[in-house]
Amino acid sequence: MEDLRVLVVAEDVLARTGLAAIVGEAEPSWTIAQLAPERLALDVDIYQPDIVLFDLAWGDATDIAPYIEATDAPFLFLLADEEQAALLLATVGDMVAVRPIGLLLRSNEAPPILYALSTVVAGLSVIDPSLMTALTPQLSPAALADEIVEPLTPREQEVLALIAEGLPNKAIALRLGISDHTVKFHINAILSKLNAQSRTEAVVQAARLGLLIL
């Protein structure tokens, strides 16, 4: 996705700078801006972000509502743990129910952050599997996965996650220590189970169902 405008928000200036560097170095065509949380409501209109990347760190998730109300842009939150995710959703659950949201455990790894940013901007929510028990039953993978005729195997989930990172078949084979033929076999199974016609469609469908391992 080209020309994405990302607004990085974090209380700690080093955290802001670090996240901006991670995203900017990985996606040079994206426009990256930074703000402290207390400046969000005042300055967000200046930047017109497509998405807000908000590092909550160990902050108070119960104070997040004013920040979400400050813009119509979707949010990708980096969270410390499941407890913080539960507090966040308990505070602003109704608000985020009407727009896509991303919830990830804090990480300095670019691929999951970049994937989540692009997916949330595309209108889909992305939830770190480790945080799923903090969600409402309506959003849990078990409830959503009822739409799948046959569940994905653990190996198929691994292949799907690498597809989401943009890896070609040969790179997936190398990463997992399997043959190209086996990778193709798993991809065909994934497409069939998700009723998808392409790798991209499979990723979109899996994100909607909460099946991706980020």
Image (cartoon, rainbow, N blue to C red):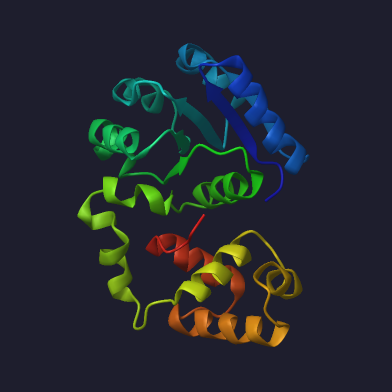
On the rendered structure, is 143 left or right of 115?
A: left
On the rendered structure, is 140 left or right of 157?
A: left
Residue at 58%, 28% (x, y): give it.
Answer: 7
Residue at 44%, 82% (x, y): give it.
Answer: 193
101 or 150: nearer the viewer: 150
213 or 5: nearer the viewer: 213
On the rendered structure, is 95 left or right of 28?
A: left
Q: Position of residue 173 (x, y in %)?
A: 70, 75
Total labels: the figure holds: 0
When the figure is inspected, residue 209 is found, relative to residue 40, above or below; the finding is: below
Q: Position of residue 11 (x, y in %)?
A: 51, 16
Residue at 47%, 51% (x, y): give it.
Answer: 123
State which quadrant residue 188 falls in.
bottom right
When the figure is inspected, residue 108 is found, relative to residue 40, above or below; the finding is: below
On the rendered structure, is 73 left or right of 50?
A: left
Q: Position of residue 5 (x, y in %)?
A: 64, 35
Q: Position of residue 116 (x, y in %)?
A: 54, 48
Please say whether residue 27 is visible from this viewpoint. Answer: no
